[in-house]
C-alpha cells in the first residue's frame, strides 16, 4: 500500500515497505508497554474504582438531603461523576480486556457488567469486534452514524437527513439507550436481513439488563428516600443525562471531527498489519486536556492511541501519545488533535452540513490520504 497526502512541496509518498516499517515500530511500542505492566497499573485502576464507589456512595447519601437545592445539586454531581467513571474509565476499558493480565475476577473482561442499560456481551460484539476491527469502513462499521446519522459524504443523502440535527440531539440525550439498541441493527431488521431468532436473543438480554437498571435508578433508590422519592428520581434522571451528554460528546469527538477519514471494503481488503494501523490512525482523533479531563474521558481523549492498542491499559495512552505522534510526523501521517471545544464544534458543524443536500454544501476540500493498492495495481482515494 502506498500513501500520498498533499504537502506544500507536493504529494508525500509512503511506500509499502515504509507502511510495514511503521507497523513494526508500533508493534515494538506495544510490546514495550506490555512488558512494563505491573503494580502501577494495578494501583491506578483500583484507585479509580475506589473513587467511583466513593462518589456513588456520596451521591446516594446526599439524595436524603435533596429537599435542599445545594445538596440535590451536589448529589447529582457526585452521582454523575460516579456513572462517568464506571462507564468510561472502568467499564469500557475493563471490557476491552485491558486488565485481564491481572487475573482478578472483578476486572475480567468476560464477566464484567457496567452501570448502563446495554448488556456487556452485546456491547463487546458491536464495539470491541465490529467497530475496532472494521473501524470507519462503510457498510461494516455501524459506528459511522450509529445507523441514523450521515457522518461522511460516502453515506447517501435523502430527504430524511434534513432532520439529522434533531436525531443527533435525541441520540445524545438518550445515548445509553442508543448504545443498547446498536447491536440490534434496526435498519437491517427493517430490510429483513436479521432473523427473528437473532432479534429475540438480543431483546431478551436487553430487557433483562435494562429492567434491572430502571428498577435500580428509578424505583428502588428513590423509594429508599421515602418522601423524597420524586426528588431522588429527578436526581437519578439528571445524573444519567449528564453521563449520556458527556459520553456522546467524547466518543463523537474521537471519531468524527474534520479530517478523520472513512474507507470502503475494497480499499481495506486483505490488509496487512501495517495497513490496519494506518487505518486506525487516519480514522480517529485525540482531544487535548489535562490529567483530570483524560481520566473523566476514560482516556478516550487519546482515541488514536486507543484504536491502535485497544487492549492496553488506558492510563498508558498519555505516556505513549508523544511517541505515536512522533511516528506520524516521521512518516508524514496526519495526527488529528484539538481542544474539546474545537472538536465538538467540528463534529456539530459536520452534523448540520451533512444533513443538507450535497449540492448545497459541496465536497469536503480537506486533503485526505490516497491509498494505492500496489498488489493489484488498484488506486483509490479516501
Image: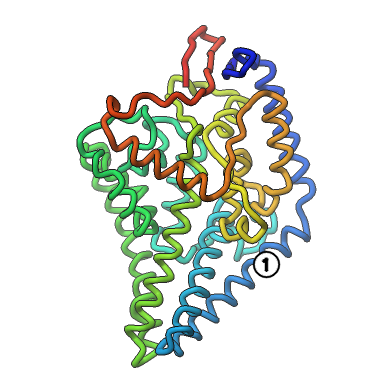
| Residue 155 or residue 32, whichever sits in front | 155
In this rendering, the answer to whether 164 lies above or below 216 is above
Residue 284: x percent and y percent?
Answer: 54, 38
Q: Residue at x 40, y 77 (%)?
A: 235
Q: Dot 1 surroundings within 10 Å: few (below 14), some, or many (20 or more)?
A: few
Residue 38: x percent and y percent?
Answer: 77, 56
Q: Residue at x 38, y 70 (%)?
A: 213
- For label 1, the residue is 46
Residue 379: x percent and y percent?
Answer: 49, 11
Residue 67: x percent and y percent?
Answer: 40, 89
The quadrant where residue 220 appears = bottom left
Element type where label 1 sits in the image: helix
In this rendering, the answer to whether 205 lies above or below 265 is below
What coloring was used for the rendering?
rainbow
In this rendering, the answer to whether 358 lies above or below 314 is above
Residue 212 seen from this side: no
The quadrant where residue 240 appears = bottom left
Q: Residue at x 39, y 32 (%)?
A: 152
Amino acid at each position: 500500500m502506498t500513501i500520498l497526502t498533499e504537502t506544500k512541496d507536493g504529494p508525500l509518498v509512503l511506500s509499502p515497505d515504509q507502511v510495514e516499517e511503521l507497523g513494526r515500530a508500533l508493534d515494538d511500542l506495544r510490546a514495550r508497554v506490555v512488558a512494563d505492566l505491573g503494580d502501577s497499573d494495578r494501583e491506578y485502576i483500583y484507585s479509580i474504582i475506589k473513587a467511583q464507589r466513593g462518589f456513588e456512595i456520596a451521591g446516594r447519601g446526599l439524595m436524603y438531603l435533596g429537599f435542599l437545592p445545594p445538596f440535590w445539586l451536589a448529589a447529582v454531581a457526585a452521582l454523575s461523576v460516579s456513572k462517568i467513571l464506571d462507564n468510561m474509565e472502568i467499564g469500557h476499558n475493563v471490557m476491552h480486556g485491558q486488565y485481564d493480565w491481572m487475573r482478578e475476577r472483578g476486572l475480567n473482561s468476560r464477566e464484567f457488567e457496567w452501570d448502563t442499560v446495554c448488556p456487556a456481551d452485546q456491547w463487546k460484539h458491536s464495539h470491541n469486534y465490529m467497530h475496532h476491527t472494521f473501524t470507519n469502513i462503510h457498510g461494516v462499521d455501524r459506528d459511522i452514524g450509529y445507523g441514523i446519522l450521515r457522518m461522511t459524504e460516502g453515506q447517501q443523502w435523502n430527504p430524511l437527513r434534513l432532520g439529522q440535527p434533531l436525531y443527533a440531539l435525541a441520540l445524545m440525550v438518550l445515548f445509553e439507550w442508543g448504545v443498547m439498541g446498536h447491536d440490534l441493527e434496526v435498519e437491517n431488521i427493517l430490510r429483513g436481513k436479521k432473523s427473528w431468532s437473532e432479534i429475540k436473543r438480543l431483546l431478551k438480554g436487553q430487557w433483562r439488563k435494562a429492567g434491572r437498571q430502571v428498577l435500580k435508578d428509578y424505583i428502588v433508590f428513590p423509594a429508599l428516600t421515602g418522601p423524597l422519592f420524586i426528588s431522588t428520581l429527578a436526581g437519578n434522571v439528571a445524573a444519567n443525562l449528564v453521563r449520556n451528554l458527556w459520553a456522546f460528546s467524547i466518543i463523537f469527538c474521537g471519531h468524527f471531527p474534520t479530517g478523520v477519514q472513512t474507507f470502503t471494503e475494497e480499499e481495506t481488503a486483505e490488509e496487512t498489519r501495517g495497513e490496519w494501523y494506518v487505518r486506525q490512525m487516519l480514522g480517529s482523533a485525540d482531544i487535548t486536556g489535562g490529567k483530570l479531563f483524560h481520566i473523566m474521558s476514560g482516556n478516550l481523549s487519546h482515541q488514536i492511541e486507543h484504536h491502535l492498542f485497544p487492549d492496553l491499559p488506558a492510563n498508558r495512552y498519555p505516556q505513549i501519545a508523544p511517541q505515536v505522534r512522533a511516528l506520524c510526523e516521521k512518516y508524514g501521517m496526519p495526527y488529528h488533535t484539538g481542544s474539546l471545544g474545537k472538536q465538538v464544534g467540528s463534529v456539530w458543524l459536520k452534523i448540520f452540513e451533512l444533513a443538507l443536500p450535497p449540492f448545497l454544501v459541496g465536497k469536503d476540500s480537506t486533503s485526505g490520504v490516497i491509498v494505492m493498492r500496489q498488489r493489484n495495481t488498484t488506486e483509490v482515494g479516501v
